Image (tube, rainbow, N blue to C red):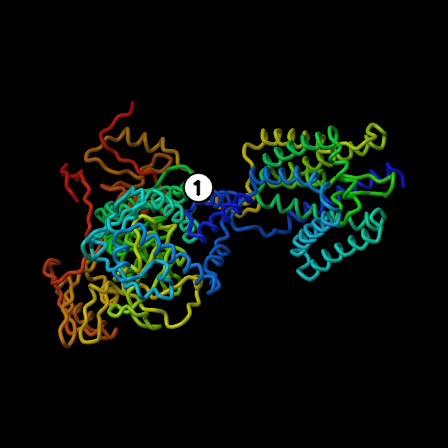
């Protein structure tokens, strides 16, 4: 299979993962702690971990790195699949993938087609799970844009200016749950890093939540478009060495975020997206102008409290707010009037 | 989210090690709860309450109590005049006084605290507020508190409002408690502010004026159009209900959804009437200045549950101070723990409040927290004839079931060898009297006779309540153009 075909397959696989994550986002509610929202502090912490992991892994023995990857990935795959298939099947899926990956890598088949296919399935499940955990934990579109910018700067430094990420990927690519989506083996293999894939999938989910379905489609087109553009660039030999994909994905995310913010003055919360908030039941504050006008023109003696409808109709009067309120309720039971004291007073 | 976990972890560490709690952590957790509500539309209160109500491992609870008890004994001995003297007199060293040997330290009578509160103030304290009890059940007692304690109590109060009561930023809370009850009022005010709710401080003003304010719409952004939550003592609540009924108000005139009620005995009769009148859910709480911020709340099964993290609660025989058997009546003896309480330090304070221990293990949503019956009354105000005491709750349940009696009910009890004479302020109505006597007999109360007095001043040995701490307001009669103090 040629590299061009592999790139095409990689783009298709990315699209399938994005679609799966989107469907998961619509249908499955992940468990979350009762208190807490994924905010900028969490972004900063996650970014810190992201920076630390590659150099740390380079200094750790392969068996330890492999063990960490297996434990983390198995747990996340279990959490991702459990809501859909139940506990037993989820254990079977996570355990099966872990055993398969460990057996293949320890038997020397870490570069085989079977390993690549198995690892891609595992990575797909991981991306679906992690993106949904983030998106369903209330992360805001602004925070994703900030996160993407920070990662792109790190990617730029780590891939182009330092050999850090290349060394990291060459070390982990034959380990179980290698953090990459790959198609093909040997020289024809094409690869998208796990971090890049996370942003390609995460941004559309957060855009759907924050700005609606159309914004999600635009976001998906933007991030997938970046992957397609990179595939074309590699296929036509515009790029011949590894490039930090986030350098291309992050600007798209930022530009889309700014455009969406211009179109939508406020981001929707998760509650608004899911329709579980009751802000709609809070009646708007009535226009006080009519009540002020009634009070100013009245100047009755003795002074009375007036219960005024928003159209200026006096619904009830009384010597106390309570009496006026009750009189208004008798006249118009469903109206919450504005209470105003009609006393000797003139406005400026 | 990770920040929330970190703050919870640090808070938990402080709690288990009795180190000072960072108020900033508490405030951050409050912010996170509010952010969660803002993001997800609601708080998963069931999940939180289940976690709070879960019974901890008894061994873990015991070791935690032991550690906190030792910490408070050491603090009391090293930093207060009273307990240094008391332990020296008893020949006890703080290290000797473990939880197993707690009975060797006699309960501290409230009278000592009342006599010289400064003898209980820690030598290392940074005092900020001296709070007095209202004095409706005895001479006022005072306690000093630090700014740290007040901030901490407000923080926990905010979390409790949001998690236990379900207060949201769009709620508007009205305080119908005495403006002089600074400790409770200040704490609730600050707690509501931290929870993001709006607050209206009314005090114990003329009930007609209070109801008028409750019925007045609130036209401010992001808040409900009417007062949605009130904090009130039972006696004033009865006054509001009775006045409201008389003036023709109904639940539709108000927007009250929840009523926080505590500080006195709330009877089932009043609870039912208040619920019907306001159409609101009633949440009963327990708190007292002397053991603040230790407190409790009444569950759906009618048990009074105590916050075991904030103090040690014992129920002891009022005479011999031995532990009360299950199902028996005893006096509440409370030791508030550091790091929640550190200025006025008390060990085994005999509160004088009578409760009945539960006959079995509670099976309710707060089963994880220690529980007793609701308060039966004050030991000092409980009269006896032979072996039969007459608790204030019994009398109030009888009287508050009769709306013909003026609110708040005023009564006095005279004990005789063959029963009690119950003197009640109310209309001298033979039918009413017959009904009261019949209901007293039905309830098995050893009441020899009931005497109705037309004037409240004629009631002998009257019991006081907080609704009598009336706060006046100046009211203008627009019809006549006159001003009056009401």
For the image, the number of numbered tags is 1
Side of B7 relative to A71 (left or right):
left
**Residue at (49% x, 44% y) in the render:** B32
> Where does residue B96 sit, x and y in percent of width and height?
36, 62
Label 1 lies in what chain? B
Q: Which residue is mark 1?
A: B24
Q: Nearer the viewer, residue B462 or A348?
A: B462
Q: Quadrant of residue B22 in the image? A: top left
Quarter of the image that includes the C terminus of chain B: top left
> Where does residue B399 sit, x and y in percent of width and height?
22, 65
Q: Is residue B164 visible?
A: yes
Q: Nearer the viewer, residue B308 or A152?
A: B308
Quarter of the image that includes the N terminus of chain B: top right
Q: Quadrant of residue B440 in the image? A: bottom left
Q: Is residue B170 visible?
A: no
Q: Quadrant of residue B27 in the image? A: top left
Q: Nearer the viewer, residue B162 or A294?
A: B162
> Where does residue A54 sit, x and y in percent of width and height?
70, 39
Tell me if mark 1 has few (under 14), some (14-19) or many (20+) residues whose alpha carbon lies within 10 angstroms of its own.
few
**Residue at (21% x, 57% y) in the render:** B111
> Where does residue B323 sit, x and y in percent of width and height?
32, 69
Q: Nearer the viewer, residue B96 or B380?
A: B96
**Residue at (84% x, 53% y) in the render:** A107
Residue located farthest toward the top when viewing the structure as drawn: A348
Side of B244 relative to B420 (left or right):
right
Residue located farthest toward the right when viewing the structure as drawn: A1
Residue located farthest toward the left when viewing the structure as drawn: B458
Q: Secondary structure at mark 1?
A: helix
Side of A184 relative to B69 (left or right):
right
């Amino acid at each position: 299979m040629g590299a061009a075909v592999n790139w095409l397959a990689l783009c298709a696989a990315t699209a399938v993962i994005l679609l799966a994550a989107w469907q998961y986002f619509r249908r499955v509610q992940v468990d979350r702690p009762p208190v807490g929202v994924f905010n900028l502090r969490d972004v900063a912490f996650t970014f810190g971990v992201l920076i630390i992991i590659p150099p740390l892994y380079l200094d750790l023995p392969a068996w330890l790195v492999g063990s960490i990857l297996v434990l983390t990935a198995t747990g996340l795959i279990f959490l991702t699949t459990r809501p859909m298939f139940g506990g037993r099947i989820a254990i079977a899926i996570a355990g099966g993938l872990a055993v398969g990956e460990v057996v293949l890598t320890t038997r020397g088949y870490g570069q085989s087609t079977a390993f690549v296919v198995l690892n891609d399935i595992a990575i797909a499940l991981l991306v679906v799970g992690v993106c949904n955990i983030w998106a369903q934990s209330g992360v805001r579109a602004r925070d994703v844009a900030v996160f993407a910018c920070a990662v792109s700067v790190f990617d730029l430094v780590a891939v182009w200016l330092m050999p850090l990420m290349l060394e990291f990927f060459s070390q982990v690519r034959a380990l179980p749950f290698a953090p990459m989506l790959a198609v093909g083996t040997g020289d024809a293999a094409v690869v998208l890093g796990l971090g890049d894939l996370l942003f390609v999938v995460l941004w559309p989910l957060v855009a759907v939540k924050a700005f609606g379905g159309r914004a999600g489609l635009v976001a998906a087109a933007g991030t997938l478009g970046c992957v397609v553009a990179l595939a074309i660039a590699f296929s036509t030999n515009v790029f011949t060495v590894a490039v930090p994909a986030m350098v291309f994905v992050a600007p798209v995310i930022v530009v889309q975020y700014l455009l969406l913010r211009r179109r939508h003055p406020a981001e929707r919360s998760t509650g608004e997206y899911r329709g579980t908030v009751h802000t709609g039941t809070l009646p708007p504050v009535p226009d006080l102008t009519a009540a002020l006008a009634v009070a100013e023109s009245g100047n009755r003696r003795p002074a009375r409290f007036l219960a005024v409808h928003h159209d200026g109709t006096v619904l009830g009067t009384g010597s106390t707010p309570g009496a006026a309120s009750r009189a208004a309720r008798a006249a118009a039971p469903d109206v919450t009037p504005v209470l105003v004291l009609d006393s000797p007073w003139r406005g400026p | 989210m990770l920040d929330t976990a970190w703050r919870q972890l640090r808070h938990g560490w402080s709690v288990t090690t009795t180190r000072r709690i960072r108020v900033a952590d508490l405030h951050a957790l409050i912010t996170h709860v509010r952010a969660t509500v803002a993001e997800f539309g609601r708080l998963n209160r069931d999940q939180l309450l289940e976690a709070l109500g879960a019974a901890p491992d008894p061994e873990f609870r015991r070791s935690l109590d032991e550690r906190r008890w030792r910490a408070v004994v050491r603090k009391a001995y090293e930093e207060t005049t009273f307990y240094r003297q008391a332990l020296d007199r008893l020949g006890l060293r703080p290290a000797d006084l473990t939880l197993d040997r707690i009975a060797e330290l006699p309960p501290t009578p409230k009278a000592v605290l009342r006599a010289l509160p400064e003898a209980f103030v820690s030598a290392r304290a940074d005092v900020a507020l001296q709070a007095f009890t209202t004095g409706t059940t005895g001479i006022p007692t005072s306690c000093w508190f630090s700014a740290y304690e007040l901030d901490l109590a407000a923080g926990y109060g905010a979390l409790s409002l949001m998690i236990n009561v379900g207060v949201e930023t769009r709620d508007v809370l009205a305080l119908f408690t005495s403006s002089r009850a600074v400790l409770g009022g200040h704490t609730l005010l600050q707690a509501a502010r931290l929870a993001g709710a709006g607050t209206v401080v009314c005090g114990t003003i003329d009930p007609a004026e209070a109801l008028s304010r409750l019925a007045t719409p609130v036209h401010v952004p992001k808040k409900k159009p009417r007062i949605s939550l009130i904090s009130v003592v039972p006696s004033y609540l009865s006054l509001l209900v009775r006045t409201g009924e008389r003036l023709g108000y109904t639940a539709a005139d108000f927007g009250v959804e929840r009523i926080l009620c505590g500080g006195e005995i709330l009877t089932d009769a009043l609870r039912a009437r208040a619920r019907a009148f306001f159409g609101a859910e009633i949440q009963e709480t327990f708190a007292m200045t002397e053991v603040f911020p230790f407190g409790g709340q009444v569950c759906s099964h009618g048990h009074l549950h105590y916050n075991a993290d904030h103090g040690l609660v014992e129920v002891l025989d009022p005479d011999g101070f031995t532990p009360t058997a299950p199902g028996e009546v005893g006096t509440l003896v409370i030791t508030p723990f550091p790091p929640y309480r550190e200025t006025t330090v008390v060990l085994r304070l005999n509160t004088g409040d009578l409760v009945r221990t539960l006959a079995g293990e509670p099976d309710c949503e707060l089963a994880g927290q220690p529980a007793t019956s609701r308060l039966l009354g004050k030991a000092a105000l409980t009269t006896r004839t032979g072996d039969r005491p007459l608790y204030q709750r019994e009398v109030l349940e009888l009287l508050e079931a009769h709306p013909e009696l003026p609110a708040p009910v005023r009564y006095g009890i005279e004990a005789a060898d063959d029963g009690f004479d119950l003197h009640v302020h109310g209309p001298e109505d033979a039918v009413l009297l017959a009904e009261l006597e019949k209901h007293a007999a039905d309830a098995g109360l050893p009441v020899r006779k009931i005497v109705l007095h037309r004037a409240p001043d004629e009631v002998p040995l009257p019991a006081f309540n907080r609704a009598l701490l009336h706060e006046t307001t100046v009211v203008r009669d627009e019809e006549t153009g006159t001003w009056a103090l009401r």
